[in-house]
Amino acid sequence: MSSLSSPCAARHLRRYANTPTRSARSVFRISYLGVFVASLTLAACESGPTLAEFGGNTMGTTYSVQVVDQPRDIDMDRLQQQVAAVLGAVNSRMSTYLENSELSRFNASRETKWLDASSELVSVVQHAQSVSELTGGAFDITVGPLVNLWGFGPEVSRDQTPSDEAVERAKQRIGYRRLHVKNAPAGLKKDVPDLYVDLSAIAKGYAVDQAAELLERQGILNYLVEVGGEVRGRGHNKRGIPWQIAIEKPHTGIRAVQQVIAVHEVSVATSGDYRNYFEQDGRRYSHTIDPRTGRPVNHTLASVTVLSPSAMHADAMATGLMVMGPDAGYALAEREALAAVFIVRTEDGFVSRASPAFARYGDGDSS
Ligand code: ADP
Ligand code: MG
């Protein structure tokens, strides 16, 4: 896709940040979209703000970048190549869908001594480990064997539940405390030879941060970067107001807006049970696994959206809170002053509950 820049065409642009592309699911698994860019009205203008945008496929999903009022010296085609290179580099280090990624090679190794790792992989694993501590182990990147067992990993999808014995066996292999990480020199170490790390719940957020920081280094002040529904925005949109992000209603088949939020210097990530799941005997099995039970989460929480300066943190915390559930998750968001919106299924439909810190961000303009 080449960059678009048609600043003065009067048009409505309703753009889904992550329209799942099943054909592009080779790397990270396609899941669902929690947020999408709200309807933007681009007014006809001669001298108003300009919008340039581009996007493509990455990590088995899509990405998009929007830049408003780009500095004159920025060549958008070159910027697009640089963003694609940054995203490709993250993928080639952190994907479990690429057999030859740095992470896949670590997973395949049976060594229990320190192994050299890139500083990028180390920094993501370090952050993941801190989120595991914060969430009491609800977020756990060693959960990979269970993700694969339930059919949500790189191996073939399944639509029936595994046996109790298989779940118990996979549970024996997991535990974030069996994974060690260090700097200088950067390295990773497993305590058990068959430990398997899955960064799918955090790497997209990290990729968003990397792309956003690339834009900022080039002096771009108004942008929205999105990878697979995880978003980071700064400055203003084409209308001269903060970027507007819609949190979806957690319906399976249709897209509808639950709430619109204004995004300025913040990232937004959502985890939910309504896109990537299978059903058996009337029960839904989603791709978020509770490491304590070895099974997909089973509670009334349909989605969690987290706002944080770091997209990596928002991504990981959304998954962690999704595992913790509506009460323990909410209590943690409150304690940590984390901005989060929990959407719970009730007999009367979806009920949304925002943590106190969410008030800092305020509602968007849903017009
Ligand atoms: P998405 O990939 O749709 O953005 P998440 O960020 O919630 O959604 O990541 C879900 C993925 O994270 C799962 O497909 C699985 O690979 C992995 N995962 C599942 N359960 C956990 C968990 N408890 N901790 C960390 N990662 C998990
Ligand atoms: Mg996540």
Image: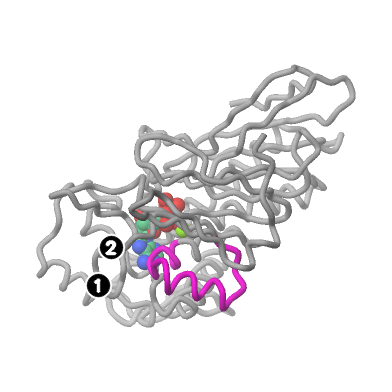
- Report the side of 306 relative to 67 (left or right): left
Q: What amino acid is at disc 1?
A: Thr
Q: Main SS of the magenta segment?
A: helix
Farthest right residue in view: 47
Instruction: Give the side of residue 294 with respect to residue 115, left or right.
Output: left
Identify the residue shown where x is 44% and y is 59%: 201
Residue drawn 58% across the image and 34% down it: 55
The N terminus lies in quadrant? top right
User: Regarding mark 1 in the picture, which secondary structure is present there?
Assistant: loop
Q: Residue at x 42, y 42 (%)?
A: 60
Check if residue 332 falls in the magenta segment.
Answer: yes
Q: Which residues are magenta?
A: 319-340
- Mark 1, residue position: 293
Q: Is residue 98 magenta?
A: no
Residue placed most toward the observer, 253 or 267: 253
Q: Please give the residue where the numbered disc 2 appears in the rendered image.
A: 298
Left or right, residue 232 beside residue 325: right
Q: Is residue 357 above or below residue 26?
A: below
Check if mark 1's residue and mark 2's residue have beta carbons within 8 Å: yes
Disc 1 from disc 2: Cα separation: 10 Å
Q: Is residue 106 visible?
A: no
| Residue 148 screen position, x and y as percent | 25, 57
Sequence order check, earlier mark of 1 and 2: 1
Question: Is 293 placed above or below 70 here?
Answer: below
Q: Position of residue 210 (x, y in %)?
A: 63, 54
